[in-house]
Amino acid sequence: MNPQGNREMEVSTRIQDSFRQKLAGFHLENLFLFMAFLLMCGVFTVLSPAFLTFSNILNVLRQSSIVLFLASGQTLALLSAGIDLSQGSIVSLVSVITADVMMRGYGVSAGILAGVGVGTLCGFINGLWVGKARLNPFIMTLGMNYMASGVALLYTGGDSIFGLPKESLEIFGWIGEGDFCGLPVPLILGGLNLAIMFFFLNHTKLGRHIYVVGGSEEAAIVSGINVPRVKVAIYTLSGLLSAIGGVILSARCISGQPILGGGTLLMESIGATVIGGTSLFGGEGGVLRTVLGVLIMAFGVNGLNLLATSTYMQDMIVGGIIIFSVWIGILRRREG
Amino acid sequence: MSSRTETVKPPTETRKSAEGPAWKKIYQEIPRDVVILLCAFLVMCAVFAILKPQFLNFRNILNVFRTTAVVFILASGQTFSILSAGIDLSQGAIVSLVSVVTADIVIKYGVFWGIVAGLFAGTLAGFITGLFVGKARIQPFIATMGMIFIASGGALVYTGGIAIFGLDRPIYQSFFWFGGGYIGLIPVPVIAAILVGIIVYFMMYRTQFGRHVYAIGGNEKAAIMSGINAGRTKLLIYTFSGFTATIGGVILTSRILSGQPHLGGFSLLMDSLASVVIGGTSLMGGEGGIFRTLLGALIIGFLGNGLNLLGVSTFVQQIVIGLIIILSVWLSILRSKRA
């Protein structure tokens, strides 16, 4: 009868629908994960009184900030439907270079700059080959993983670098173990990183482009996005964030270790991102989810430690959590 | 359109048949990049042979084959998962699990039951991964990464983190045969690898399963549309991949005569992945095959051996392997762009 009004109605309902979808997709899934996190903390609090103490929580947050740095870089890679397997060995490389430059007496800031510079360079090389040469990110970062850890081992001849000079030690140790206004320094750095990443992903052009590239690369190319450049930025940033994580971790053990990132650090970074609900297919997820994933892993492991569960058992539980969190996501999407 | 195909096709066929000999026809069917890879392999071996004459020693070659055999066995299972556009990251962890289970049961109940238990444990782990990937439709990367934690954690829980020794007593001598024995001049692991290779060849090129794997890797939606049961095929793929990891685990355990919860660390998995990838099987799925994997495994094996003989540190070797992985894939991209 009144086509104009009809169309308006249609448009408004469509807007409502899309709004509701956004609400359901964003809020509910985050909320669900958040509830699971609170429930887990509740159980641990009941079982172990030491869990909900101020010092324990600060300690866990201090430790988890390193994984947060790596995982937020990983989030960028996964959002673009890629992956960064080189993070662990970049941490190792950064560790030995930072420590070595300080050992040579150039001071803390030079050491950190050198370490972060080299880590970012590794990420930049990843980005060039993934973006410009169109190498599969899995392959490129796998290759980089071999190379960076090889270089780190070669650099020190396989030894660790101990005994940093006294004038560097104070400031460097402060980065890992110190407090600022009553809060652990790594936690403050992690919070800063979170704020910047959130702003970057949601309110900058490059950040939005990452989502588009991950959603459909062809669509991104067609709509005029410079996909290679976006990818160079992604892997460079991932390298930079891994490098910062490497500096903090080295500061925590006040030494340069060529196998510092060789253990489960990479797995934790990918695992936390995935538990948070960022999809491996790209285009879905975000840094807030990753924070939740990091917290779930960190407090989960801490709680199990307090309950005196063996670390071997914890491995199995973490594996189970990774699989089930993704499975639940898949089931919910199938229902919806 | 039909006339066009008719006018194009006959000349090529006559050219082929006119030039005749069978080997030429076979040669023309081999993809160009495999030829290049093979040449690169031969050049590499020649360089090593010139620099270090020991490289061509019969015993040295046999030894390389023996160590490469395990990697190849793992990689042949990995080939299936990568062909289907998936990946199996859990192979190393399964090797660890199999090692401790086999060693423990061999000591408790004898060699036969030990191997049966090992085979069962590893294949079961692969089956569970397959269920997650095929039935619950969890991405292979996630499911197998979760399985790393579960299987390696399981191996550590099983022994409490310590290694199981005591397999070196004479009563278990028959167990050592699997890793250290010979049939004629040929080491048993090599024979096992050949057997696995033949089985994989038939599975890949002569069975419905193999064709389904290629179809799923090429285009999963199209494969499902055309009636392929993708879930069941994936279940089989990951069960088989776990099975090959299990065989590798039994051989390695027998070779070192102990059950080690860290036996299948990161490097074994990486060698398995690198063999498949260097051979040129695409991570996007649908392209590649077992011969490429064989070539990849041989390149990694002889490269490591040659560099060792030259006294190059393992640190540098890591860098070299990383470079080769990237370069081999980059070359194939450049070539496909030009074509």
Image: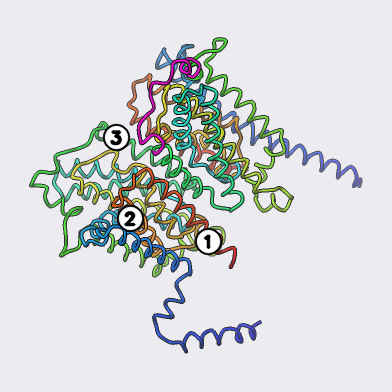
| B154 w.r.t. B256: above or below | above
Q: Which residue is mark 1?
A: B218
Q: Which residue is mark 3?
A: B156
How many C-alpha atoms fall within 10 Å of the one at disc 3: few (<14), some, or many (≥20)?
many
Q: Which residue is mark 2?
A: B301
Q: SS for tag 3?
A: helix
Q: Which mark is residue B87?
A: none
Camera sees residue B243: no
Q: Residue at x 43, y 87 (%)?
A: B20
Q: SS for tag 1?
A: helix
Q: Residue at x 46, y 58 (%)?
A: B83
Give yes or no for contact between labels 3 and 1 (Cβ–Cβ under 8 Å).
no
Give the magenta range: A154-173
Give yes or no for contact between labels 1 and 2 (Cβ–Cβ under 8 Å).
no
User: Mark 3 belongs to which amino acid?
Assistant: Leu
Q: Earlier in the sequence, mark 1 or mark 2?
A: 1
Q: On the rendered structure, is A80 left or right of A174?
A: right
Q: Earlier in the sequence, mark 3 or mark 1?
A: 3
Quadrant where the image shows the N terminus of chain B: bottom right
Q: SS for tag 2?
A: helix
